[in-house]
Amino acid sequence: MMIKVLKDKLVEKSLIGIRTIYQEWDEVIIGFIKSIEGNNLILQEIDEYGKTLGETNIEIVDILSVEFDDKYQIKLMSILENSDLFESENQVTIWSKAKELKIVVLELIEKDIIATLFFDEDFFITGKILEFQDNYIFVNNITSSGEDDGYSIHLIDKLIGIRYNGKEELKIRYLLEKLK
């Protein structure tokens, strides 16, 4: 059954995800099958922005699962077809004290721009800042898949950086608008 599905996806030129015995439980190699020869397949890998990463040779006996036509891959296919939209020469990243970022926060609210807000090196959120009031910012959180993820309130004094107009934010905006 697995080999038949792989051959069908090769002919269809479908985007697939492959999990092998060498990946962690949450890792999937995503791409297009370029060829199947004997017990091996060559997968043209792509990244989350639709860019080619290179070719990977995979032994079919090492494949644990093949995923296809799922929500992520459907979105990724759309990203792939529009990958030129995510070339960001206008990315802005500002690392600064919170008080100096207040002006930027107000501009992002006014222009309805999706941004990534950094509160610590390992803690960040991405979304639209809806309101700035009494030293707090109110954010409409958006997932990397462009889906609304509720709201959060943060102390502005904990904000250490902002990024907007980057690949990630452009991808999220595209998916968010596409999902409407």
Image (cartoon, rainbow, N blue to C red):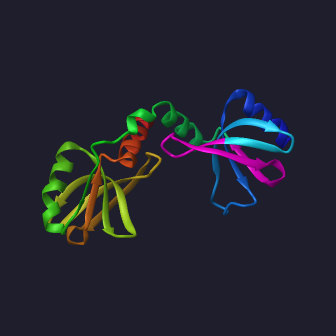
Percent position (x, y) of residue 154? Answer: 27, 67
Residue lying farthest to the top in this orientation: 11
Q: Is residue 37 left or right of residue 126?
A: right
Q: Residue at x 41, y 33 (%)?
A: 84
Return the x and y of residue 116 as percentages of the image width and height: 32, 56
Q: Main secondary structure of the magenta part?
A: strand
Q: Is residue 73 above or below residue 160?
A: above
Q: Nearer the viewer, residue 152 or 48?
A: 48
Residue at 30% from the left image edge and 68% from the top image edge: 119
Residue 161 lies, with reference to residue 51, above or below; the image says below
Quarter of the rendering occupied by the N terminus: top right
| Relative to 162, 72 lies left or right | right
Image x and y of residue 173, in percent: 36, 41
Please identify the quarter of the rendering in which residue 146 is found: top left
Question: Where residue 166 sits: x, y (%)?
Answer: 34, 47
- Assign the C terminus to one quadrant of the image: top left
Placement of 63 over or under 101, stated as above or below: above
Q: Is residue 50 magenta?
A: yes
Q: Nearer the viewer, residue 70 or 47?
A: 47
Q: Quadrant of residue 44?
A: top right
Residues 148 and 57: in front is 57
Asked if residue 63 lies in the magenta stretch, the reply is yes
Query: How many badges with numbers are in the image?
Result: 0
**Relative to 75, 111 lies left or right:** left
Residue shown at the point (27%, 43%) measured from the top left: 90
Q: Which residues are magenta?
A: 44-67
- Kindly identify the residue that appears in the image at 68 percent across and 60 percent down: 23
